[in-house]
Image (spheres, rainbow, N blue to C red):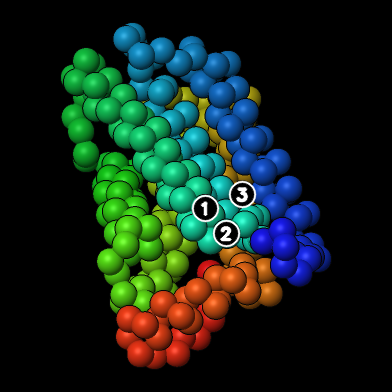
Amino acid sequence: SMDGPAAPARPAGLSAYVAVSQALGLTLLLATGAWLGRYRGGVAWQSALQLNVHPLCMVLGMVFLQGDALLVYRVFRNEPKRSTKALHALLHGLALLISLVGIIAVFESHRAKGIPDMYSLHSWCGMAAFVLYLLQWLLGCGFFLLPGASFSLRGRYKPQHIFIGIALFALSIAVCLLGITEMLLFNIRDSYSRFVPEGVLANTLGVLLVAFGLVVGYVLTRDEWKRLPLAEELALSMDFKTLTEGESPSGGSQ
């Protein structure tokens, strides 16, 4: 709070890594747009270009916004936990909505063109990632945002929530790589091996996706960069836990 002691300084190096992650994230969005615009005819909903809505939405939602939602606890270290949690849930919810638009686009495009659905490895892994992501979001809201879940229940679920979050982020990037390969093999199968510009650009997008994932993953797994509970949060949680469960809590971090 403003009246309390000065907020602790941000750990050395954290800001630089977060900045690199955002630069990579914006670059991969630009690379996706450049690929679809330059080589795939652009993006439109009610037309033969509807399929192109799918990769744009999935890169924006399941990769960029999901990654940023994971970084919320590292970036907003000195904000109240409740508002940080709300932003974390809001970004994930927005990622889900944008991804849902992308999924609707691919099904509608397939129906219009008479292409079968859900036969490829990309589609199987992609649908699994989306369904699990939705479940993870619903469980996260239920355990951490809505009142009712006890401290011990939250404490037991939290390690699973964090692990599944990072695993789903990695799976989402892997699904994008499968999707890029699938699009290239459908569209430029005969010329791909000759290092044509479209193939090089799409490969570069794949490398950017991996780089974004690695930088976000590094920030998330550095123990000294985890958000520490603010003094008032620690005091409140101790009071609340003692009242509700008669235990003394440990001040965990996320």
Q: Is residue 174 above or below residue 193?
A: below
Specify the quadrant of the image occupied by residue 126: top left
> For the residues marked 3 and 2, what is the alpha-carbon distance in whole angstroms?
27 Å
Looking at the rendering, which quadrant does residue 3 occupy? bottom right
Hey, which residue is sitting farthest bottom in the picture?
Answer: 247
Label 3 crowd bin: few (<14), some (14–19), many (20+), radius 10 Å: many
Real-space CA distance between mark 1 and mark 2, rounded to the nearest whole angstrom: 6 Å
Callout 1, which amino acid? Ser
| 35 with respect to 126 (left or right) | right
- Can you say whether 156 is above or below 169 in the image? below
**Residue for point 36% across, 14% down:** 45
Farthest residue to the top: give it: 47
Q: How many numbered callouts? A: 3
Relative image position of residue 164 (x, y in whole percent): 39, 64
Q: Which residue is mark 3?
A: 212
**Can you see residue 31?**
yes
Q: Residues within 10 Å of mark 2 (few under 14, many from 20)?
A: some
Q: What is the quadrant of the N terminus in the image?
A: bottom right
Q: Compare residues 227 and 173 and report the one nearer the observer.
A: 227
Residue visible at 64% across and 35% down in the picture: 26
Q: Which secondary structure, mark 1?
A: helix
Q: In the rendering, which numbered label is found on residue 98? A: none
The residue identified by callout 1 is 83
Query: Nearest the camera: 116 or 234?
Result: 234
Q: Earlier in the sequence, mark 3 or mark 1?
A: 1
Dividing the picture into quadrants, the one containing residue 222 is: bottom right
Residue 66 in the image: x percent, y percent?
48, 47
Q: Amino acid at mark 3?
A: Phe
As drawn, which residue projects farthest toward the front? 3
Q: Do callouts 1 and 2 mark residues in contact (Cβ within 8 Å)?
A: yes
